[in-house]
Structure formats: C-alpha cells, structure tokens
Image (cartoon, helix red, strand yellow):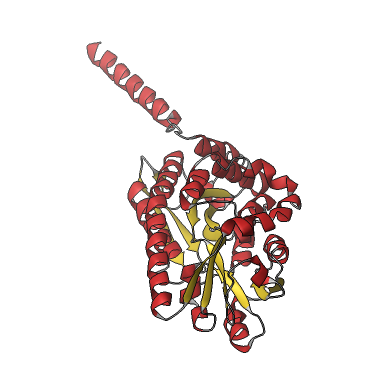
Amino acid sequence: MKKTLAVLLSCTAIISLAACSGNSQPAKDSKETQAVTEKSEESKAPASEASSDDSMGETVKFKLADNQADGTPNVEGDIHFIELVKEYTNGTVEIELFNNGVLGDEASVVDMLQADTLDIARVSTNSISPTCPAFNVFGMPYVFASDEQKYAALDGEFGQKLTQNLLDDTGLVNLTYFVSGARSFYTSKKPINGVADMSGMKLRAQDDPVTIAMIEALGGAATPMNYSEVYSALETGVIDGAENDFTSYYSSGHYEVAPYYSLDMHTAPSSLLVMSAGSWNKLSGAQKDAVMKAAKDTIQFQRDSVDAFVKKSREAVEEAGCTIIEVDVTEFQQTCSPVYDKYPELKEYLDLIK
C-alpha cells in the first residue's frame, strides 16, 4: 500500500512540474519591448530546427545588411551588436553581417525588410522616411543644437514616439538608433562665409524634398545627384558644392576637389537598426529581451566610434590643406524658418526635442 501511494505521489509531482514549465514566460522590462511583443503576437513563428538552450529557445540565424564599408562607425556598431546578441542569447541567435551594400542599396533593403525577405538592416532615417514620413523630421534644418541634445532626444520620448510610429505604420521593429556626424556644406571654388555666399550656388542635394527646400531657402540651386557622381561633378564644375559630415567628406575624397568646408552643421541624421516583423516573431520572449539589451548596450560604443572617426577625418582634411570655416549658425537658422512652415505635420515630433 505504501509503495503504491509513493508511486502515485511521484506521478502527480511530475505532471505538476510539466504543467508549470509549459506556462512560464519571461517578464518584459521595457515599454518598447512590451509594445513590440504585443504587435508580434499577431503572427506565430515557425519552429526552428535546432535548440541549443532551453532557457532561451530554439536557435535562429539572421542576416544583417549595411551599405557602408569596413571600419566605418556604423559597421563597427553592427559588429558590436552582433557579438553582444550572441553573448546575451547564449549563442541561440546568430547574425551574419553583409555590408558594403552587397544585398542592395538602402531603398531596396527597406523593401526587403517589409517583404520579410531580410532579417535586419542598418538604414538611414532618410531611407526609411518614404515608408514612414515621420522620419522626415531628421532632415529638418538646424533641429539639434548639439550632440548632447540629439542623444537626449533619441534616448527619450522623441525617439520612442518615432519607434512606435514605425511599428504602427509598417510592422518593422526599430532596435536602436545609430548616429552620424553633423552635415555641413563644402565648396570647390569659393568658401561659404555666410548665407549671402550661397546665392545661385549649384549644390548637390539628396533626392529628398526637405533637403531641397533647405538649400533653396538659403538661396542655393539644389541639384539632386547620385552620390557616386559627386566627385567628378565637383571636379568638372557641374556643381559648386555639396554637403555631408566630415567622415564622408574625407572617405569619399571630396576634400580633394572641394577644399572649403563651412561648419553650419545644418542636419544631424541618424540611422536605425531595424528588424522585420517576421524575423522578430521567430524569437522567444527571452531572446527578444536579450536582443533589445544588446541593441541598448551598443549605443555608447557606436557614438564613441563616430566621435573618434569625425575627429580623425577632420584632422586628415586639415592636414591636406582644406579650409574649415566657422559661420554664424543663427543666420542660417533664421533663413531656413520657412522650411518649417512647409511641414506642419512634423511639429508634434519637433516639440519633443528639449
């Protein structure tokens, strides 16, 4: 009788343990992760073939696309993120990097993310804005007065609202923001010392309405052009100047044919580390938390990489004989005020920048 009772109690304990383990889910510890998780409940992930850690879930493999070259701050940030993901998920989430644009340009990559044919990509806010117009706010002139203000905005309500907007509009999951140096104008024949010097200048512009509106407000003639054509256009006089940050100004070689760099710092664009909805849904709850933590812990590393790269690039172009011109930024800001009137829908985001 005692032996029978012992067997029954043992079976009951096993059944209870099995029931408890089947219902356990790790708690979410951030509003952003919670919102993304609620969105992802709409579709369930297919089972992966292997499982290497019961506490994390099944092993998954992803591809990450970036159009930039080895050694650049964004690619260094990608690599750091990938390493942290592997560590934090106990090796159950493996990410392979495809940079140098081998998977396509940024516009193509965004399409692939939405079609769930690509897992993750580092894309500029300019490239995501056709899909989610709220990101046009990053193209508005003279939005951030300093790097510190920009970082505070990205880490605060401003960044969170845009992340949620992207999720609501597209289903894409923004894991974190990467940053770039501030963009300024550079010219080939004469320097820009003030707004008056820009009158009639043919300046290469990204094919983006906000950038074009800014150049026109400053009196320039905006000339949309593929980035790969800018060097020869500067060299031959097809255009008088262009605009970019120090790192691109140096790495592209544009400083060789446009030696005047005017520090008006009109825009400070950012990038997003974006994950497709389908790939996000392949992760267990614990893996989602780990991936988000890896993204958060990559932020400072990437920002430090940008600061170092900008400093190194500026030193290199100064050593090459380029002229760096300090300008009255207030004059440029005031002249660009009509641009804000053209985009009243962005005011709710601008108001969040403190």
Residue farthest toward the top in the current orientation of the protein: 1
Q: Position of residue 344 (x, y in %)?
A: 74, 46
Residue placed at 34% from the left, 25% from the top? 14
Residue placed at 61% from the left, 76% from the top? 241
Residue placed at 53% from the left, 76% from the top? 260
Of 315 and 79, the residue lying toward us: 315
Place residue 131 in its image quadrant: bottom right
The reply to whether residue 141 is visible in this rendering is no
> Is 142 positioned to the left or the right of 212 in the image?
left
Residue farthest toward the bottom in the current orientation of the protein: 236
Q: Which quadrant of the figure contains the N terminus?
A: top left
Query: Tag count in the figure?
Result: 0
Residue 165 lies, with reference to residue 120, above or below; the image says above
Q: Which quadrant of the figure contains the C terminus?
A: top right
Residue 57 lies, with reference to residue 245, above or below; the image says above
The reply to whether residue 186 is visible in this rendering is yes
Q: Position of residue 117 (x, y in %)?
A: 59, 60
> Is 75 positioned to the left or the right of 209 in the image?
left
Of 150 and 53, the residue lying toward us: 150
Q: Position of residue 25 (x, y in %)?
A: 44, 32
Residue farthest toward the right in the current orientation of the protein: 342
Q: Position of residue 176 (x, y in %)?
A: 49, 49
Place residue 227 in its image quadrant: bottom right
Residue 53 lies, with reference to residue 208, above or below; the image says above
Of 290 and 67, the residue lying toward us: 67
